[in-house]
Image (cartoon, rainbow, N blue to C red):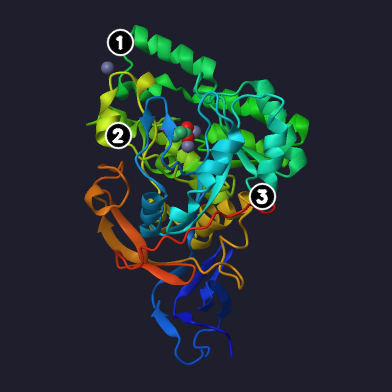
Amino acid sequence: MIRAETVVRGGTVVEAGWSAPADVFIAEGRVTALAVPGTPAPRGVTEIDAAGLLVLPGGVDPHCHVGFTSGEFTSLDDYAQCTTAAVFGGTTTIVDFAIPRPGENPADVAYTQRAKAGQGLCDSALHACVTEWDETVPGQLGALVADGVATVKMFTTYRGETMANEDTILRTMKTLRDLGGMVVIHCEADHLIEDAQTRCAADGAIGAEHMAATRPELAETASVAEVLAIAESLRAPVYFVHQSTAEAVELVAAARRRGVRAFSESVAHHLILDDTRYGGAAPERFVCCPPLRPRPAVDALSRHLFTGEITTIGSDHCCYDLAQKRSRRTDVRAMPNGLPGVETRLPVIFSAYVAGGGLPASRFVALTSANPARANGLYPRKGTLMPGADADLAIWDPAAQWQVTSDALHMATDYTPYEGMLLTGRPRTVLVGGRVVVHDDVLLDPTPRGRHLPAGPILV
Ligand code: URP
Ligand code: ZN
Ligand code: ZN
Ligand code: ZN
């Protein structure tokens, strides 16, 4: 008899690469078996009926800013609230960032942030961040990788805040290569952005409605090319966060064909929304970096979901409220950048691309769960329902029709960029470590049981 305390019966299990009718047996927080439907279970198990539903490994969000301070603004959530929203949206693992303020030390900031994992309703992992090189950085990175923080965020923009110069990028990449870690990088060439912003400001066109023109696509392309050259020359792995254009993704794909270990992350808002939002009401709700792009660019980017050239989909969740977004809306250079999205990532992508776009559900799982787990050294504990994996499940109703309203969401803000959108598909029941945490949009278990997940080998 297969060991089980809980069995999820009658659903279609969807993994990266396959799907099939199967029952999921769960004991002590882990999957014990994927079994032929109807396989007998021990007496007294809890049975969860998943007939007509998809049984997915819970989402892994590889790009999530929790309580992030940038300039004069701090995003409004903590681990408890961010992970609550995540679980409502079917995501059961988040990867947060520990980003030093000028003068702070990367390792200290990472250890402080890591200590918050216990406040979460689900597990979390962490990207450290290097902004400046000094002789202590290799030692800090060695300690961090040994302690399970193996991915390090870098930026080629946000001068005076988190931007790193090319020497720092090269040295950090080389150090991490030797340690078995990986740089994850935000690429927008800051000199091109500053020039565009200066021109826009001279024309009196620097408000939120002009966001797209202040951060041109070329700035992203140029920076990706530069960073790829560093990675190729060092033979180091590199992961590009929130790539917003097909050109940027194609540069990475071409490098991969030459043998470079380079990977593309795209984020939900760049795959769903376009730059016409800056011409509509309250454009500050859509101010993010890189900005939303024109519809043809969104379509070109999204085609790469189907070809496998995009490796992961994140949210780039960053929870500011309308008052914060409005407060500097006349000058994007001073605005808080970023959109709330940890809760909506899976539903908006499922609706647009699986329900509405012909993307196989197994590819959806690869992009939103398995590949993010692999890229962050969390696989096969996360990102799969194979025996031995943590029993984090999103039992998904692929036919549910619903309308997004910020009032019904759980993020620490008062708006959503998807307000009013009609979606198909949503999580019905979400299990974390084998416990039902959310069912039919009700939080059944608010107990914080989050753990920090140490990164194992990076598998992309
Ligand atoms: O606009 C964005 N993306 N804000 C969050 C910080 C970052 O650059 O990822
Ligand atoms: Zn970024
Ligand atoms: Zn204007
Ligand atoms: Zn980000």
Residue 27 percent across, percent down from the top left: 53, 78
Residue 434 percent across, percent down from the top left: 48, 72
Q: Residue at position x 44%, y 90% from top?
A: 44
Side of 101 where 255 appears, left or right: right
Q: Is residue 318 visible?
A: yes
Inspect the image, locate mark 3, and give the three-letter code of the amino acid beneath it. Answer: Val
- Callout 1: 10 Å neighbours few (<14), some, many (20+)? few
What residue is disc 3 on? 460
What residue is disc 2 on? 285
Distance of label 1 from label 3 (alpha carbons): 45 Å
Inspect the image, locate mark 1, and give the three-letter code of the amino acid beneath it. Answer: Gly
What residue is disc 1 on? 204
Locate residue 292: give its quadrant.
top left
Labelled pair 1, 2 in contact (Cβ < 8 Å): no
Inspect the image, locate mark 2, and give the three-letter code of the amino acid beneath it. Answer: Arg
- Callout 2: 10 Å neighbours few (<14), some, many (20+)? many
Residue 210 percent across, percent down from the top left: 33, 21
Residue 91 percent across, percent down from the top left: 44, 57
Q: Is residue 105 above or below residue 121?
A: above
Side of 448 where 228 appears, left or right: right
| Label 3 within 8 A of ligand 4 by Cβ | no
